[in-house]
Amino acid sequence: MKLLEGKNALITGASKGIGRSIALKYAENGANVAFTYLSSVEKGEALVKELEAFGVKAKGYRSDASDFKAAEELINNMVADFGSLDVLINNAGITRDNLLMRMSEEHWDEIMNVNLKSCFNTVKASSRTLMKQRGGSIINMSSVVGVKGNPGQANYAASKAGIIGFSKSVALELGSRGIRSNVIAPGFIETEMTDALDEKTVQGWRDAIPLKRGGQPEDVADACVFLGSDMSSYITGQVLQVDGGMLT
């Protein structure tokens, strides 16, 4: 039995990195997958083909979750195309790192819109559908930086901490309707973004982690499978750190 057999999932920001890995793990576990992308149409189309190879329904939507109306339209279209929304994963996110003294207002606002407001937009837009269904799993992607803070990332840390407070409130508000809301806080995950970094720096980070390695996108995707599946049916309002013990 596949853990997500017959469930319909929507993943934002899935054309690369962690989002792409989640989409593939979901399809592998029997879920039909809707996903959003912003820039590369080619990557979006290629991912649809990869997902369909698992024998599930897949569709990509070019949509900006940080736009309130676009998010509403996205949810409506996804539910019309798939029939229901069982798992919503807010994965879309960006960084605009700088020390507070040098941080522009524009970079603060951009991070809040893309990382935090997008969660509000999609959860609000899908809440009516989820309440009617009397069930569903919301998974919002935070970061260990949202738990602990990080110099040079005041904007990013604030947005990711905001996601935690938002998700816990949603868990309390919607729990009576059978809707669960949880957070995943990844640590140092090795993706295309980290490939560009100096190997010595990266190794230094690995050495500081109790499990002595960086995480893989699949490590985060596995946690998403668990929280999206019925195996976690009594878990809500939680923050699951996928960080190799980094914050222990």
Image (cartoon, rainbow, N blue to C red):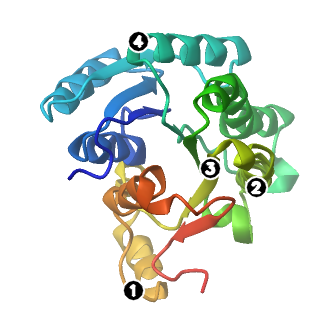
Residue at 36% in and 46% down? 22
Residues at circles 1 and 4 in contact by the CB criterion of under 8 Å: no
Return the disc, 3 or 4, that comes first in the chain's sequence: 4
Q: Label 2: state its secondary structure.
A: helix
**Residue nearer the viewer, 70 or 191:** 70
Mark in the foreground, 3 or 1? 3
User: Up-down: is 93 above or below 161?
Assistant: above
Q: Residue 149 placed where, x, y %?
A: 74, 67
Return the disc, 1 or 4, that comes first in the chain's sequence: 4
Give the alpha-carbon distance from disc 3 to disc 4, as whole Å: 23 Å
Residue 8 sits in quarter: top left
Amino acid bearing label 2: Lys
Decide: few, some or many residues near mark 4? Use Cα within 10 Å; few <14, some 14-19, many ≥20.
few
Q: Quadrant of the C terminus?
A: bottom right
User: Up-down: is 244 above or below 185?
Assistant: below
Residue at 18% in and 31% down? 50
Return the disc, 2 or 3, that comes first in the chain's sequence: 2
Q: Label 3: state its secondary structure.
A: strand
Return the disc, 2 or 1, that comes first in the chain's sequence: 2
Residue at 47% in and 77% down? 205
Q: Label 1: state its secondary structure.
A: loop
Q: Residue 181 placed where, x, y %?
A: 64, 50
Return the disc, 3 or 1, that comes first in the chain's sequence: 3
Q: Which mark is residue 211?
A: 1
Amino acid bearing label 1: Leu
Q: Residue 152 placed where, x, y %?
A: 72, 59
Residue holding disc 2 = 168
Residue holding disc 4 = 81
Q: Which mark is residue 180?
A: 3
Q: Is any part of residue 142 visible from this angle?
A: no
Residue at 86% in and 35% down? 105
Q: Label 4: state its secondary structure.
A: helix
